[in-house]
Image (tube, rainbow, N blue to C red):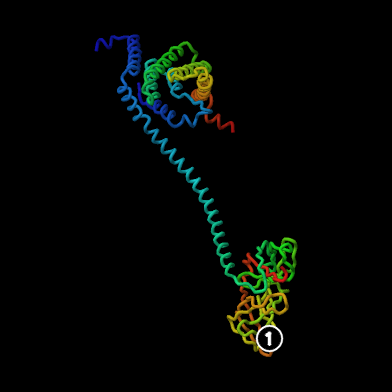
Amino acid sequence: MNLLSNLSYSNWRGIHIALVIVLSLILLFAGSSIKLMVSDTIVDVFYIPFYTLRAYVEEVSNVNDRNQNLAAELAETALELSFHREFARENERLRQILDFEHPTGYRLLQAKVISITGSGVPISAVINCGLDDSVMVNMPVINRFGLVGRVESAMLDNAEVQLLTDPRNRVAVRVASSREMGIVRHLPSEGMLLTAFPNQGKVAVGDTVVSSGLGGIYPPGVQVGIVSGIIRPENQPDAIVHLQPVVNFRSIEQLFVLIPEDKQ
Amino acid sequence: MRVVPFLIYLILIVFHQVIFRDLSSIYNVSFNLAGFFILCIALYKDEFVVLWFGFAAGIVVSAGDPQQMGWFSLMFAFIGFIAFHVRGRLNLESMSAKLGLIAGGIFLCNIGEIIINGSDNFIFQTVYTALPSTIYTSVVAWLFFLFKEKRITTEKFKSLF
């Protein structure tokens, strides 16, 4: 103890410097096992907690990135799925069209609706076929459910179709079961009506009404509507027959222009 | 001598090496925190402290590469020792004197690291790594001394806005 306490500052200084140099040299020239032991100890004590923290932060960051990528992929896939569903619907529609029996004496010209007009219920539609496709004024237009209307005007590559829902349009029809005749027209306030139908005429709710072919525009036998209500006012010559159109005019998309075979 | 603050400095050095260095580096130029701590200790503490802290910091910094552990501990202890003795010849009231000491010390540290790591292109490494790192560290040291000497306080800072 005396020896230690007698050491002056300069001696202590020398000892410290010598110790640091010696320890550094030991670390320099010691065997790998000693170096590894020191290194492992330092890494375990100082580095591992921070590496763990860093790995955790990176993982959270990666999860966030992955989450954003997945969200983008999900949006893309949802869009793709919606396209596929639309294709499936179109496929189904076209399959049904293949089974569709059209009136004899006519050729079917497939047309797509490119715009419709009318407030509430559409009253006219523009199709993507025109004079170039042999479409002419007054040619009947149908879809797979029944009568849609007639061509009102035709341009080179498109045509305007007057729908049955246009109040100006009239169709000569028959009740399919009784063959009694009348005229179908559409009034915005009352919907589709069978007019000029005798009060005592044979008709019942659920009967099908088809075009009669009279008038020279529409071919006979094309479905127009289903009887949904009958009012027979007393002392009136005509009954008021309400029809449910077979065509949903709000969803028309794929139409056919009936081109007489003699006009090809 | 209390050991805890120096342990905290060592932990901060590791934290900087593992997590903060990548975040704080500018164009691959990073701040030399170990060198900065050693030189600050040389400025404010006594000779034995800086000697041993330099030695410990050298071991901690090079723990990932055991072959270089001795070189780093020797270099850091030596730079701390030199800085402590240069300090005696400086007017410590002067900011530029302290910054000069820090910049010189950091530059020596960076050069030493390049030599120890055995880089192929010494001149390139000196110009594109050691020098920018010295400037970066000196700028941070300047801000540190401004705060430490209360030339910038939070009140003064707030009064700017």
Quarter in which the C terminus of chain B is drawn: top right
- Horizontally, residue A212 falls left or right of residue A50, namely right
Report the residue at 47% width, 29% height from top: B21
Residue A120: image x %, image y %? Answer: 66, 68
- Horizontally, residue A1 falls left or right of residue B66, namely left
Residue A175: image x %, image y %? Answer: 63, 82
Report helix, strand or loop for mark 1.
strand
Residue A148: image x %, image y %? Answer: 66, 71
Count of numbered tags = 1
CA neighbours of label 1 inside 10 A, class few (<14), some (14 to 19), many (20+): some
Q: Is residue B79 visible?
A: yes
Quarter in which the N terminus of chain B is drawn: top left
Near-viewer residue (A182 or B116): A182
- Amino acid at circle 1: Asp
Near-viewer residue (A261 or A256): A261
Q: Quadrant of residue A102?
A: bottom right
- Horizontally, residue A188 falls left or right of residue A41, namely right
Q: Is residue B150 visible?
A: no
Residue at the outermost bottom position: A235
Note whether A253 is above or below A173 in the view shown: above
Note whether B149 is above or below A10 in the view shown: below
Near-viewer residue (A125 or B36): A125
Residue A105: image x %, image y %? Answer: 67, 73
Q: Quadrant of residue B15?
A: top left
Chain of the residue displaying label 1:
A
Q: Which residue is mark 1?
A: A238
Note whether B62 is above or below A196 in the view shown: above
